[in-house]
């Protein structure tokens, strides 16, 4: 059976998120292994800032990753509860009162008909609020992960670019002086 566009999108998003998280830690590890300190203070500061930003990005990504299944679990409960609510409504229209068991405080209670529908409506509202809060958390963490990743990459680029830039500047000074003298 062919996958729906939504299933493909979810699968690709998951793969991308794992790739980004792995890339984050890979770059962090490689930058630590290949670092050189001592020549330029500013390069060392940017290097450490880059490490910190990449580490923070990775930790945020891990924390975010643990909430993604929670969001899907809540969405599944919403779907199941909505389906059960429709079944009760259809049964009520036919004059049948379906029994629905509920667990509260470790005790099971059974409601029938309209009271069960009202209880399910309240449960749906609670689940939708939980889902929105969870989704907001996942979205905020993705934004923070992406931002700190980009900051980390930027800091590493600056840190690794300072020594060559200063070296080129030092080598170019005699050339610039000779050019200036000829003008």
Image: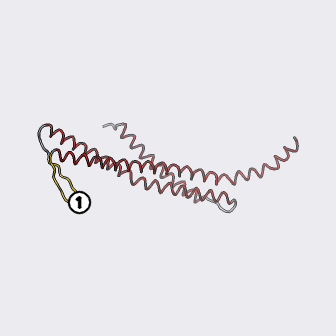
List x then y, in percent, for residue 93.
15, 37
Q: Which one is nearer the viewer's eye here, 54 or 97? A: 97
Q: Which one is nearer the viewer's eye here, 76 or 39? A: 76
Q: Is residue 170 toward the left or the right of residue 134 in the image?
A: right
**At x 16% / y 50%, what residue is drawn?**
111
Q: Which one is nearer the viewer's eye here, 87 or 168? A: 87
**At x 77% / y 52%, what residue is drawn?**
170
List x then y, in percent, for residue 144.
49, 51
Quick one: which residue is furthest to the left in this view? Answer: 95
**At x 64% / y 52%, what residue is drawn?**
158
List x then y, in percent, for residue 119.
22, 48
**Dot 1 surroundings within 10 Å: few (below 14), some, or many (20 or more)?**
few
Which quadrant is the N terminus positioned in? Answer: top left
Q: Which one is nearer the viewer's eye here, 88 or 141? A: 88
Q: Is residue 61 toward the left or the right of residue 113 in the image?
A: right
Query: What residue is pinned by disc 1?
Result: 105
**At x 73% / y 53%, what residue is drawn?**
167
Which quadrant is the C terminus positioned in? Answer: top right
Quick one: which residue is furthest to the bottom in this view? Answer: 38
């Amino acid at each position: 059976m062919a996958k729906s566009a939504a299933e493909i999108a979810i699968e690709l998003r998951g793969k991308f998120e794992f790739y980004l998280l792995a890339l984050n830690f890979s770059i962090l590890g490689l930058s630590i292994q290949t670092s050189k300190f001592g020549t330029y203070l500013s390069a060392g500061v940017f290097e450490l800032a880059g490490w910190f930003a990449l580490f923070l990005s990775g930790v945020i990504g891990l924390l975010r990753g643990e909430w993604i299944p929670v969001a899907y679990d809540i969405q599944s409960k919403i779907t199941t509860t909505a389906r059960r609510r429709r079944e009760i409504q259809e049964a009520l229209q036919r004059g049948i009162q379906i029994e629905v068991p509920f667990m509260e405080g470790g005790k099971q209670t059974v409601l029938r008909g309209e009271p069960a529908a009202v209880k399910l409506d309240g449960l749906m509202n609670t689940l939708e609020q939980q889902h929105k809060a969870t989704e907001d958390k996942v979205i905020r963490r993705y934004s923070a992960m992406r931002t700190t990743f980009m900051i980390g990459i930027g800091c590493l680029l600056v840190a690794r670019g300072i020594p060559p830039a200063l070296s080129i500047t030092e080598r170019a000074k005699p050339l610039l002086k000779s050019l200036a003298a000829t003008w």
